[in-house]
């Protein structure tokens, strides 16, 4: 019975299959009888459908298109997909509210088709998007609307999600044609365009990165001024463009592009300031010779950038972008970014208010030196210290000296940063700190207030405490985990830092005694006396070898030589200081 049932079942199945085939053949014959022009009119007349009807029509057409594609993914029918493209074209002129409802359905369908496994169909969808975008962007976008952004989203979706380099390349090629052909009308669409380019900037395929950067370059030179002047979308587009260039600069696969990306960030800054200068010149009707524009471009005009949100949004994308690039592992890119960062600040810093400078130092410049805390003393004079930390600190000191009137309130923090450098157990960093303090004082010692000198003396005093000779417990316990050579190296580094400090205090006392108050001079003199007493005490205590067991016989002898040298230097500095003060007072008495 079961066998009969199974046979019957097979017989019924075969019968049903035959019947289905006959029905399909009959349907195909009927379809051939239908005039294709009539079918085309169904779709071309979709523009006459009511608002609700067109939404239903689009919904069901997309559903049929999905079924066609899913039925045979390797060789799908594309009839319905072609019709999707056609009705998109026919219904673009609908009012934007209705169009937005239609596109929410169509755009999602284009996104899904752009990622199908069949490359030809995916390319067809993307190329169709290109053609539709060219048509759609012919019209101006009303202020406060973002239909362009919504329309271009499938490009961004395909770029960010496609695993095929060919598809991603096609997206860039299509976007390039769309942007270059319709840039004059793009408003909210810039948002998506830069998102696509930002994604491309992180790609590893040379063709994709090169094509995308070519487009960014053209936008900067041909459309950037128009882009940033859009009152509704210009501010956001400006930020997106700078962030996009930062991404290209950070792609470590293509150094030539990275270098040019850094330069383009500066170009964007110049174009932006030039535009502000032009507007300022237009407003200054009496200035017929354009002198205001020239002054503004050179940083010498009356225009001032403050800590207001619009001004922060103008400067921080550029400055923080260059800050991020300045930690790039490639030396040439890192150096280029640092040079560009300080060039921008030197050029336009005169127009910065003290409040804006405060934000720039805390948000951009001081963070440049966060890595100082993470430099391992065992690394020695690392490349970062030599090629980045040193030059950056030198440029920061120059910047501080040039704009001292606006930056004087930040001087205590600047001194503390330099004190951290000096107290660092890496000798090269300590040299950078001492050198920067001397450079600042060489320029601005004459205008420092008593409070500023007090701040410097506090920092120097704090560093002296941190760099004092290692105690017995530190030598015998805290350094028990390191070898004898490493112990001696650490002790030697601390000795050389203390010698640097002694020389710094001596220079302060001799070169700037006329600027120092009585209290400050007494504090520095006490530091020298304390340093002398500490060194003398160590030399007496350890002359018997007590506490030096961990350094070995040779190391212990070397350590004692260092301590004697410190004691002698501190004593010499103390005497030099007192003689200098004595001669100064004698001169004052004679003049009196």
Image (cartoon, rainbow, N blue to C red):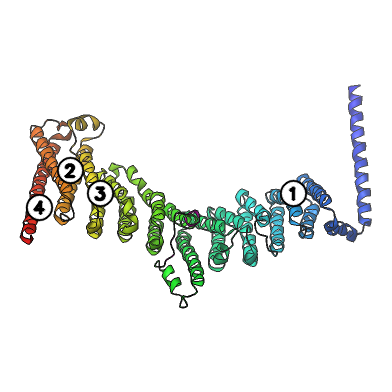
Q: Quadrant of the C terminus?
A: bottom left
The percent position of residue 52, horizontal first and vertical second, equals 82, 49
Q: Secondary structure at mark 2?
A: helix
Dot 1, how many residues are within 10 Å of its Cα: few (below 14), some (14-19), or many (20+)? some
Task: Determine if residue 329 is in view.
Answer: no
Q: CA distance from mark 1 to mark 2?
A: 73 Å
Task: Write the residue at 49% across / 66% down.
Answer: 276
Query: What mark, if any, has residue 581 been given in the picture?
Result: 4
Name which of mark 2 and mark 3 comes first in the sequence: 3
Q: Are marks 1 and 4 in contact (CB under 8 Å)?
A: no
Look at discs 2 and 4 and give the one toward the viewer. 4
Name which of mark 1 and mark 4 comes first in the sequence: 1
Query: What mark, if any, has residue 451 been given in the picture?
Result: 3
Q: Secondary structure at mark 1?
A: helix
**Is 542 left or right of 283, judged from the image as shown?**
left
Q: Are marks 2 and 3 in contact (CB under 8 Å)?
A: no
Q: CA distance from mark 4 to mark 3?
A: 21 Å
- Residue designated by label 2: 495
* 306 within the magenta span: yes
Q: Secondary structure at mark 3?
A: helix
Q: CA distance from mark 2 to mark 4?
A: 28 Å
The percent position of residue 10, horizontal first and vertical second, equals 89, 32
Q: CA distance from mark 1 to mark 3?
A: 67 Å
Q: Are marks 4 and 3 in contact (CB under 8 Å)?
A: no
The span picked out in magenta is: 302-311
Query: What mark, if any, has residue 105 been given in the picture?
Result: 1
Q: Quadrant of the N terminus?
A: top right
């Amino acid at each position: 019975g079961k066998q009969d049932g199974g046979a019957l079942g097979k017989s019924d199945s075969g019968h049903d299959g035959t019947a289905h085939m006959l029905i399909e053949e009959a349907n195909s014959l009927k379809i051939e009888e239908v005039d294709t022009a009539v079918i085309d009119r169904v779709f071309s007349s979709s523009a006459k459908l009511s608002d609700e009807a067109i939404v239903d029509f689009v919904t069901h057409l997309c559903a049929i298109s999905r079924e066609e594609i899913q039925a045979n993914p390797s060789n799908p029918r594309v009839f319905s997909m072609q019709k999707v493209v056609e009705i998109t074209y026919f219904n673009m002129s609908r009012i934007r509210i209705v169009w937005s409802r239609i596109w929410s359905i169509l755009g999602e369908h284009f996104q899904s088709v752009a990622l199908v496994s069949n490359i030809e169909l995916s390319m067809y969808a993307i190329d169709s998007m290109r053609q539709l975008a060219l048509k759609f962007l012919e019209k101006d976008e009303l202020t406060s609307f973002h239909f362009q952004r919504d329309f271009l989203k499938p490009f961004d979706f395909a770029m960010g999600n496609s695993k095929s380099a060919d598809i991603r390349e096609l997206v860039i090629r299509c976007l390039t044609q769309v942007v270059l052909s319709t840039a004059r009308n793009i408003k909210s669409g810039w948002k998506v365009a830069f998102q696509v380019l930002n994604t491309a900037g992180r790609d590893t395929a040379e063709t994709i990165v090169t094509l995308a950067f070519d487009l960014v370059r053209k936008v900067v030179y041909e459309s950037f001024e128009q882009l940033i002047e859009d009152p509704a979308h210009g501010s956001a587009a400006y930020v997106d463009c700078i962030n996009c260039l930062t991404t290209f600069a950070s792609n470590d696969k293509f150094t030539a592009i990275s270098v040019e990306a850094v330069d383009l960030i500066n170009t964007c800054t110049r174009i932006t300031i030039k535009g502000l200068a032009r507007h300022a010149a237009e407003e200054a009707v009496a200035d017929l010779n354009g002198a205001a524009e020239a002054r503004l471009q050179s940083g010498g005009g009356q225009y001032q950038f403050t800590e207001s949100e619009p001004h922060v949004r103008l400067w921080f994308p550029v400055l923080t972008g260059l800050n991020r690039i300045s930690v790039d592992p490639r030396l040439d890119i890192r150096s280029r970014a640092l040079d560009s960062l300080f060039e921008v600040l030197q050029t336009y810093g005169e127009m910065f208010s003290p409040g804006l400078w405060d934000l720039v130092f805390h948000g951009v410049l001081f963070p440049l030196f966060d890595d100082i805390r993470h430099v391992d003393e065992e690394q020695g004079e690392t490349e970062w210290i030599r090629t980045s930390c040193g030059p950056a600190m030198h440029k920061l000191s120059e910047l501080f000296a040039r704009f001292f009137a606006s930056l004087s309130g930040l001087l205590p923090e600047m001194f503390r940063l330099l004190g951290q450098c000096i107290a660092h157990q890496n000798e090269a960093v300590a040299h950078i700190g001492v050198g920067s303090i001397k450079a600042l004082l060489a320029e601005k010692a004459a205008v420092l207030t008593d409070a500023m000198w007090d701040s410097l003396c506090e920092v120097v005093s704090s560093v002296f405490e941190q760099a004092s000779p290692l105690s017995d417990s530190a030598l015998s316990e805290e350094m028990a985990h390191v070898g004898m050579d490493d112990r001696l190296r650490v002790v030697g580094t601390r000795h050389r830092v203390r010698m640097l400090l002694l020389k710094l205090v001596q220079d302060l006392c001799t070169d700037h005694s006329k600027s120092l108050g009585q209290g400050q001079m007494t504090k520095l003199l006490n530091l020298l006396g304390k340093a002398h007493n500490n060194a003398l005490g160590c030399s007496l205590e350890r002359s018997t070898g007590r506490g030096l067991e961990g350094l070995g016989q040779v190391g212990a002898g070397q350590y004692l030589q260092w301590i004697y040298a410190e004691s002698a230097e501190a004593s010499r500095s103390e005497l030099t200081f007192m003689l200098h003060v004595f001669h100064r007072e004698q001169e004052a008495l004679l003049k009196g």
